[in-house]
Amino acid sequence: MQFVSDVGDLSRHITRKERGDSMDGFEESIGKELSECLSHILTLADTYGIDIEKSFLKEHTRVKGEIEKGN
């Protein structure tokens, strides 16, 4: 699945940046990878009839609550 490949590319870019490798054009590259991943997510949500906005807001609220609790 292309989505998995794109997530791997995103992970490699982030790993390189986090370990301090010199990365010319990082912002452009990471923006492209993030956009590709988001495109796949939105397509999957549409394919399976998922209200992605509703799902995101529910999950975001849950995660935010966990962070505030210190977990």
Image (cartoon, grey):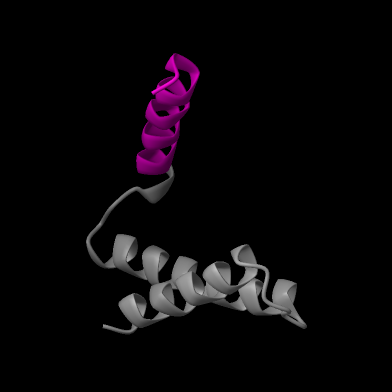
> In which quadrant will I find the C terminus?
top left
Answer with the quarter of the image where residue 19 lies: bottom right
Q: Is residue 15 above or below residue 57?
A: below
Q: Is residue 28 magenta?
A: no
Q: Residue at x 32, y 60 (%)?
A: 45
> In which quadrant will I find the N terminus?
bottom left
Q: Is residue 68 magenta?
A: yes
Answer with the quarter of the image where residue 35 lies: bottom right
Q: Is residue 61 above or below residue 18?
A: above
- Residue 6 at x, y = what percent? 42, 79
Highlighted range, magenta:
54-71
Q: Residue at x 43, y 45 (%)?
A: 53
Q: Is residue 56 above or below residue 27?
A: above
Farthest residue, direction right: 24
- Residue 46 at x, y = what percent? 32, 63
Q: Residue at x 36, y 70 (%)?
A: 43
Q: Using residue 36 as the reference point, say whether residue 24 is left or right of it.
A: right
Farthest residue, direction top: 69
Farthest residue, direction left: 48
Q: Residue at x 37, y 36 (%)?
A: 59
